[in-house]
Amino acid sequence: MDRGMILFIGVLLTFTSSWLGLVLFPFWQLQNQPAFQTSPEEEPYPRPLQGLAWTGMKVYQKNGCMYCHSQQIRSERFGNWWEDPTGIMRTGGDIRRGWGTRRNVPRDYIYDSPTMLGTMRTGPDLANIGSRYSATWQHIHTYNPRALNSWSIMPSFAFMYRKERIVGSRSEKALPLGREWTVRPGYRWRPSPNEWAAILQQSGDQIKARFLRESGQPISDWTTPETQQQLLEFWLATPEEDWQILPTEEAEALVAYLLSLRKAEYPLPEAKE
Amino acid sequence: MNNSHDDNDIVKSNQPGNFHPSLDSEMSEPADEERDTIQRMLDVLAREHAEPRDGFEPVPFWVAAIFGALLAWGGYYLGTNSADFRPDVYDRSDLRQVSSGGSAVSVPDPDPQTVPELIKIGEQKYAAICASCHQPHGQGNLAQGIPPLDGSEWVVGEQASPARLARILLYGLTGPITVKGRTYNGLMPAQGNVLKDYEIAAVLTYIRNSWNNNADKDKPPAITAATIKAARAIHGNRKTNGTQPYTVKELIQIPTDYADPGATPPTATKDKK
Amino acid sequence: MAVTILARDHLRLQAAQERVTIDRSCRGPVLAFSATALFWLLVGSLLALLASLKLHSPYFLTGSAIWTFGRVRMAHLQAVALGWSSLAAMAACLWLMCRLARVELIYPRMLYLACALWNVATTLAVAGILLGDGTSVEWLDAPTYAHPFFVAGVGLVTAWVVATFRRRREAHVYVTQWYILAAVFWFPWLYTVATLMIFWIPATGVIQPVVNWWFNHNFLGLWLTPIGVGTAYYIIPKILGRPIHSYYLSITGFWALALFYSWAGIHHLIGGPIPAWLATASTVGSMMMFIPVIAVAINHHMTMIGHFHRLKYSPALRFTVFGAIAYTAVSFQGSIESLKDFSEVAHFTHYTVGHAHLGAYGFVAMIFFGLYYYMIPRLTGREWYSSKLIRLHFWCSAVGITLYFTALSIGGWWQGRMLNNPNVPFANIIMYIQPYLALRSVAGTMMTIGHIAFAILFIINLAGWGRQRSGGPTLFAQPPQLTPSELPKADSLMNAPVTQLQP
């Protein structure tokens, strides 16, 4: 081992072996997979991302979404092997959680670049998120996930939304959120006792009238803690009068991308379990 | 500790001449200050041990034995778990089939027939999938256009029927819907690809018998896997991936006493909340 | 100098003078690499802390795009993996290669250029990611415009290390040199191939993650690990003044690492949309890693045996031995983790994060800390200012990483069990894992405090505010006077082959 050349040839050969085995051989095996088509009339699957969805993929990429969200559905036999030594019981969590209807295969990703399979599931898998939620849900959840799930630890992406004064009527795109979530975009807001007292002083009667009108609950005594709490919650759930939250182009693109993610439902022949 | 003597510096005895102990020409040139530095470094270095070298203890037999055993195991494992290096075998449960030549044993889905059994399955599915929109107690979310399930006429009241409910879950629902006197305009994602028939029946039975809802009290369940299967069957090619959702207009064309062929007729399902 | 010296002292002085010349020749570049590495360690620690806090306090700094979790996490990885670890690794390569080849560094100015290139690259990477150019390719998140700088930087270092090796005056090639030469050869190849196949000429679909994981695992396995292990192979026998236990085990360990480590990596995609044989091949590669790890562990342990009391005194030794033990632990854990039965649970969870940090921090960073404590006084000619601060650094780092690892291992394991059980609602998993994530922030804070103490020591040393040296080094405690029986046995050393000098 005192000869540099032996060392050089040795490290060259060992590394070449893994390079050939783990990189070049799979490259040769998987590089030229075509999209799948049952007949020439049917549109092929998968299809490359286009337009807004492609822009949205870039937003997803630059904000590192894949560090918490994978995009791969595993076999329905995957997982808890000790409870299921024969693989017959199908304990695989991914499909049974409703994250997709079948496992993913290499062909699902032929148009992805970069291929963001992900390696963490701090959040749920997104391979088939497009079939699970509506655009409105996605916008609210992106704007502030805790407006929907109080337990969520996902960041608020309120910086992708802008708060605007309403000119004329409220925009159709405005997020349907109460003031609890819109007064401080990205955060949860509640008035301090003094602020709340001031608000009640100023427009308490209006709020109460609206509460009675919309909830249909007959309340005569407004002074009990319960009714006061009810009134506050009602007021927080109503939208701000003069302001609206609108998605920026980035947010629109991201949601378009999320809605386009339907990687785990088209029945590919090789994905049969 | 660093003051112990090193006897093994002998190897350096035939140094090239510029390491003579007296300061050689190169080292005597520096200015006084730098010479001080050199002198100090010399002091430090002189107390240092010589550069490390090798001992020549033999490799113990047990270590060699472990290495041999590992190599043997590696060869065996590679041989039995690589499915002839095929690119279309993804999982070790598939490997088992490849090596045994058989196909996976398919186990029939369970088909619970009692209300408590269905509720037990439905409760878990509801928490995992439905609760993030309809909320854990079925109260819905007015701001986001998500109608309540608790006390809804579409779940337990005059608009409810097994056939209608089955369709909402299988194919999804879009467009405005009036629930408890309010209009909601959201999008109900289709669950037909995500949930199995018995699971849809379980979720429906759960929401019809939770909170203030009491549809199947002291009765056999109105909805079982057979109901859902029948609703799936009669539509044949209608896609359950959310691309062909129902609208309320379409839904109310189904009479509430209608039952799909093969499903139990909804005789006892006229119920009050 | 007109003193009569004994022949033995004469030889020791000769050797010492040689070391003076060598250390002086590489002082500038090596200090440049070390200092900038330390800077990135601080940047990386702060980014890590931020990311960690955000995972259990999602409203923390939530308003700005720059500090959103995904970006901070990518920036953290670049700062610590390519900033701190790689720069420190290159400093180690240069200094150890010069010392072991017993030649001065030639044309040191070009290495300032290498250092500058690498720092420009890291700055581009970290700033680029925060400003929205991150690529979401794990470990290769740096924007594509940083790639040429990285390649040029490491290319120069490789050339200098090889040139130094070829000019060697010491005929015997010590085990540390094998590791260093292999690492500086592997890494540029690895980096170039991975960036080419993922960014410049992108491969199709799932081949990208395959190449990606091949790179990720080998970044640790063929770049940081060989240099870390090589450094331990230098520091331990050097401080103890004993030969390394067995040359044969050194050889076994080295070649087994070269052959098997490069095959690991794809097991990180277990269950994913890739052919089964790829994950299987990596599982075998990972399990075979038991061979080099056992060999290195025996070698280090048998060298240390009977001298563990010296961990009480020497900071460099204590950090290095901690790192060497962590290397054994993390490698055993990694091999077991690659088994599919285990991986099915640990996959997609914080368990893997805990494992990665035990490797990158408990092993690699701790060994580099040890190297700093040994190397920097020899380069600057000044001792460490305060043994209290060193002690603070050690305990913060050691307790911090232990807490970090324990919290994430326990939390992550149960997270994985729950993820695999479809009847556990996702909300429950998130709520379950949060206390563990909070503990991770506590551990991260401790480690950051340690790094700040370390940085203070380093700055004082570099600026010359500290104690000039004449007496002994800064130790945790003064060792008792050695009795003659504890002195190194001359005869055991005499049996070593007398190496030849090149003409």
Image: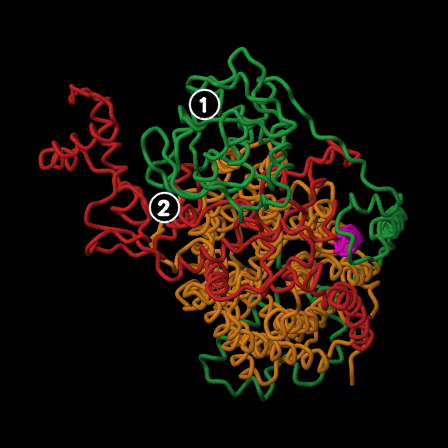
Q: Position of residue A264 (x, y in %)?
A: 62, 50
| Number of other residues with Cα within 10 Å of mark 1, as a class: few under 14, some 14 to 19, many 20 or more | many
Q: Residue furthest left?
A: A202
User: What residue did someone put label 2 on?
Assistant: C59
Residue at left offset 69%, top offset 41%: A76
Marks 2 & 1 on one chain? no
User: What residue did someone put label 1 on?
Assistant: B156
Q: Which residues are magenta?
A: C275-293
A55 shown above or below C388: below
Q: CA distance from mark 2 to mark 1?
A: 40 Å
Residue at left offset 42%, top offset 52%: C50
> To which quarter of the image does residue C410 belong?
top right
B1 shown above or below C7: above
Q: Position of residue C345 (x, y in %)?
A: 66, 40
> To which quarter of the image does residue C211 belong?
bottom right
Front-lying residue, B161 or B205? B161
Magenta span has C213?
no
In this rendering, the count of numbered labels is 2
Chain drawn red in the picture? A
SS for callout 1? loop
Specify the colour of chain B. green
Chain drawn orange in the picture? C
Query: Circle 2 marks a residue in which chain?
Result: C
> Can you say which quadrant of the picture contains the C terminus of chain C?
bottom right
> Can you say which quadrant of the picture contains the N terminus of chain C?
bottom right
Judged by its main secondary structure, the magenta piece is helix
Please say whether residue B38 is visible from this viewpoint: no
Say left or right for C54 vs B90. left
Say left or right for C309 vs C461. right
